[in-house]
Amino acid sequence: MIPPQIDLTLRHLAHFHPAISALSLCIPMIFAGPALPQDVQGGRNLPILYGARLDGSRLVIDVASFGCTDASYFSVHLDPASMDTYRLSVVPEKQDRCRMSVHVITLSLNIPAVPNLATTRFLFMNLFSAPITLPRSEP
């Protein structure tokens, strides 16, 4: 929110100079909070996935790592959306605090038990991205 004294001053000056009018449009952006990924599962931000596939009763994902990330850093959460559809979220359990340059790794995670897994549909809640500039780590 713009402090009232700044807002009133900019509105007053905008009548005299068009550049001030343009500046008054930028001020709300300065005071706006940062945009964050959607929170799911207890208020934690979901990591970006660079790939995902089902392998039997496991979920194989590609995620960014700084050198220490392994399967214990994530868990799979399922929320029912309908009778045969679940919202699937890959949720971070801890943060990778190593200092290696970021790269993409492949991890295999257990999927919680669901009835009739072969016909179940999943809606991913995580965002997906292409690892255009990130190198891929060899398994």
Image (cartoon, rainbow, N blue to C red):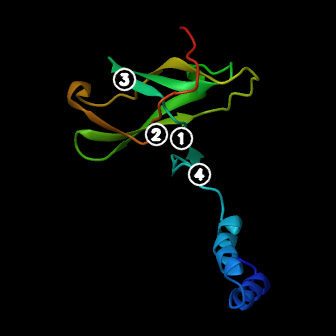
Q: Which residue is drawn at 55% across and 29% down?
A: 74
Circles 4 and 3: CB atoms closer than 8 Å: no
Camera-near label (4 vs 1) is: 4
Q: Earlier in the sequence, mark 4 or mark 3?
A: 4
* SS label for mark 4: loop
Q: Earlier in the sequence, mark 2 or mark 3?
A: 3
Circles 2 and 3: CB atoms closer than 8 Å: no
Image vertical order of residue 38 relative to residue 8, above or below: above
Q: Check residue 126 in the rendering and tell me which mark sits there, or answer none.
A: 2
Q: Earlier in the sequence, mark 1 or mark 2?
A: 1
Q: How much space separates mark 4 and mark 3, taking CA atoms? A: 25 Å
* Along the line of sight, the residue nearer the viewer: 36 or 29: 29
Circles 1 and 2: CB atoms closer than 8 Å: yes
Image vertical order of residue 134 relative to residue 90, above or below: above
Q: Check residue 53 in the rendering and tell me which mark sits there, or answer none.
A: 3
Circle 1: is it few (<14), some (14-19), or many (20+) Cα within 10 Å? many
Q: How much space separates mark 1 and mark 3, taking CA atoms? A: 17 Å
Q: Which amino acid does label 1 sit on?
A: Leu
Q: Residue at x 40, y 29 (%)?
A: 112
Q: Which residue lies furthest to the left in this view?
A: 119
Q: How much space separates mark 4 and mark 1, taking CA atoms? A: 10 Å
Image quadrant in which you'd find residue 88: top left
Residue tagged 4 = 36
Left or right, 26 with reference to 83: right
